[in-house]
Amino acid sequence: MKNLFRYTLTLFAATALCLTTACDKEKPEYPFPLPGQDTPTPPQEITTSHTLMFYFVGTTLNQEFAGNLTSAEEALKELSKKGGALYGKRSRPRVIVYKQKSRSVAHIFELKYGDGECVKDTLATYNTPAAMPAENVTAYLNKMMELAPAPSYGLVIGSHSRGWIPIDAENWTRCIAGIDGGSAAPYWQVAPGALVTRFLGEGYPFYGSYSTGHSNFFDIWDLADALEATQQKFKYIIYDACLMANVETLYDLRNCSEYAIASVSEIMGVGFPYKTVIPHLLGDNGASFNLDGVCEAYNHYYKVHGNRSGSVSLVDNSQLEALAAATKAALNETPQAEVEEKTLQYYDGLSPHLYYDFGQYINAVCPEGEVKEAFNAQLAKSVPSKYTLNYFYTGLSPHEGNHQINTEAYSGLATSLPSGKYRTEYAETAWYKATH
């Protein structure tokens, strides 16, 4: 089912946002000195309708990130050429990027566009620490907003990800053959020869180019704290990373943005097709955005390019607490109910599987009646738009390859509740505590 969703900013809404969030408070100084060069002088102010921010995590996907930027530049060139939607506008959206050039150097730059051209303008350069603390994310995002102040902000996070799983959920030093006498990875293992996917963070031991002293791994709750610490609730966050559209992950991130866009499965290495996505994010000269259009563009791109891995969801974060309440009521209907995992739609290549379809599972354990109806009504409010194809690809062992999706069962959200893995860690998640 496709639910058209279009959200249009108005001056009143922008003003209301400032009155109901921390916008009316003076932004605090950074909690620590930013590493690297002295704070650069902000560029000359222009009238900005909206700022779109890209935050690219780490370096192992740098080739793919470069492709994302090329795609974004192509979109901005098209929008700004004569006859384009942004041609000759006095007030316009701005596009700001944080990206590491190497393990030790990062840049903040703007994609400046006009008259069918687009160039990179470096605004700040930093020496990045070997192990990136989540607090630095707050500082870099605050600097980006300082350099391109606007009535509203949208954010794209490009990264690897494995969803809500804590960093210390198991002894990662034993996950790679030959490290500290360890054996081949019994669970999280990229299959030899697998295609590149965005399998948050990167670092030892998953990516061999990093040592124990180099890491960009963040626990989801630390990422949530870092985003909330900016004191800016983003209009939307696009999680261009694998396995992010699960209730456990998005519930932790619910206060970071009004809306979230993510996928239940692995995202192919090329990520979102920004050439066709950006026009939906910068509508009406930056005054509106069509998030359903973003999802449709993503799905269409992968339908044309391989006809797989096109699962994407738009989530209304303001509805997630109500979804947790509806889920709790549904689970309480039959607290001892069990469902065979093999009957459920899964979205990973792990053994045993970790991510199953959320809506399908709750409907399987909850008997017919008003409680189930209320759950499904709330699920529809929480996921106003969802798209999928018939197959998803996973690079994870032992089930690397294409896997079929039951499109009738697809709810747009995944969950780890039916899985037998990480039960101790699962019981500590905010989602579990809200639903049990």
Image (tube, rainbow, N blue to C red):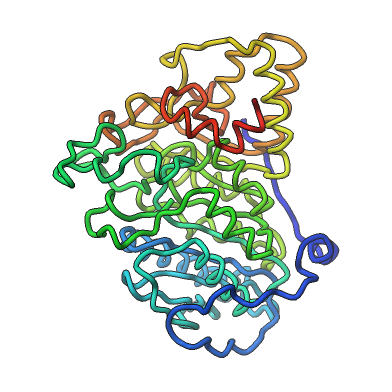
Of 265 and 28, the residue lying toward us: 28
As drawn, 334 above or below 135? above
Q: Which residue is drawn at 50% across and 72% down?
A: 77
Q: Which residue is drawn at 60% across and 56% down?
A: 280
Residue 386 point in image, percent of width and height: 58, 37
- Quarter of the image with the N terminus is top right
Q: Which residue is drawn at 17% across and 47% down?
A: 179
Residue 378 point in image, percent of width and height: 72, 29
**Left or right, 23 with reference to 413:** right
**Left or right, 347 with reference to 45:** left
- Quarter of the image with the C terminus is top right
Of 379 and 137, the residue lying toward us: 137
Q: Residue at x 80, y 66 (%)?
A: 18
As drawn, 364 above or below 383? above
As drawn, 210 above or below 313? below
Q: In which quarter of the image is residue 19?
A: bottom right
Residue 108 point in image, percent of width and height: 48, 76
- Tell me how many marks there are: 0
Residue 75 point in image, percent of width and height: 50, 65
Of 430 and 315, the residue lying toward us: 430
**Left or right, 222 with reference to 191:** right
As drawn, 363 above or below 278? above
